[in-house]
Image: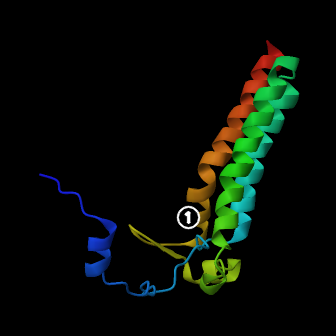
């Protein structure tokens, strides 16, 4: 059964303590070089540009603007989140460090080229799909 506890009763027995300090530094940089994120955003926006120019009709203006806003928000919000708390500012990995050391994943250490391929494979395929779609539409 539930029992109603008044504020006064709770205040008599409550122990107020300081907020705990984090045990380790929080890394919000996502580790990989910024260039990979810029390339990812560029490829997604490039897909939208190819589709907008290749299949330009007045009815697609609003959906393309909405898709663009989603992409900008989807990558912009984490970028802002990564730099929010100054006490936990960690820098993303540099290209030279990625090339020399690779990056650790759940399945083991991955070389720089493999990591870049894993990050960029989907955006590249989507961009190529857009180019193929516009090409097919133009030829038919």
Whether residue 5 is visible, yes or no, is yes
Q: Residues within 10 Å of mark 1 (few under 14, many from 20)?
A: few
Q: Residue at x 77, y 51 (%)?
A: 42
Q: Residue 10: percent from the left, percent from the top? A: 28, 72
Q: Is residue 118 above or below residue 16?
A: above
Q: Is residue 28 above or below residue 126?
A: below
Q: Residue at x 78, y 32 (%)?
A: 64
* Quadrant placement of the C terminus: top right
Q: Residue at x 68, y 80 (%)?
A: 94
Left or right? Give the position of 47 relative to 106: right
Q: Secondary structure at mark 1?
A: helix
Determine the image quadrant of residue 139: top right
Q: Residue furthest top?
A: 140
Q: Residue 1: percent from the left, percent from the top? A: 11, 51
Q: Residue 89: percent from the left, percent from the top? A: 64, 82
Left or right? Give the position of 68 relative to 8: right
Q: Which residue is mark 1?
A: 114
> Who is closer to the viewer here, 1 or 86?
1
> Who is closer to the viewer here, 78 or 100?
78
Determine the image quadrant of residue 36: bottom right
């Amino acid at each position: 059964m539930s029992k109603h506890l008044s504020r006064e009763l709770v205040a008599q027995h409550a122990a107020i303590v300081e907020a705990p300090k984090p045990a380790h530094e929080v890394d919000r940089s996502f580790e990989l070089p910024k260039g990979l994120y810029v390339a990812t955003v560029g490829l997604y926006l490039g897909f939208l540009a190819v589709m907008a120019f290749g299949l330009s009709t007045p009815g697609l203006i609003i959906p393309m603007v909405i898709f663009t806003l989603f992409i900008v928000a989807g990558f912009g919000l984490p970028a802002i989140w990564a730099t929010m708390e100054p006490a936990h500012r960690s820098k993303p990995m540099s290209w030279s460090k990625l090339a020399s050391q690779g990056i650790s994943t759940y399945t083991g250490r991955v070389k720089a080229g493999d990591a870049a391929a894993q990050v960029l494979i989907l955006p590249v395929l989507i961009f190529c799909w857009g180019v193929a779609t516009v090409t097919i539409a133009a030829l038919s």
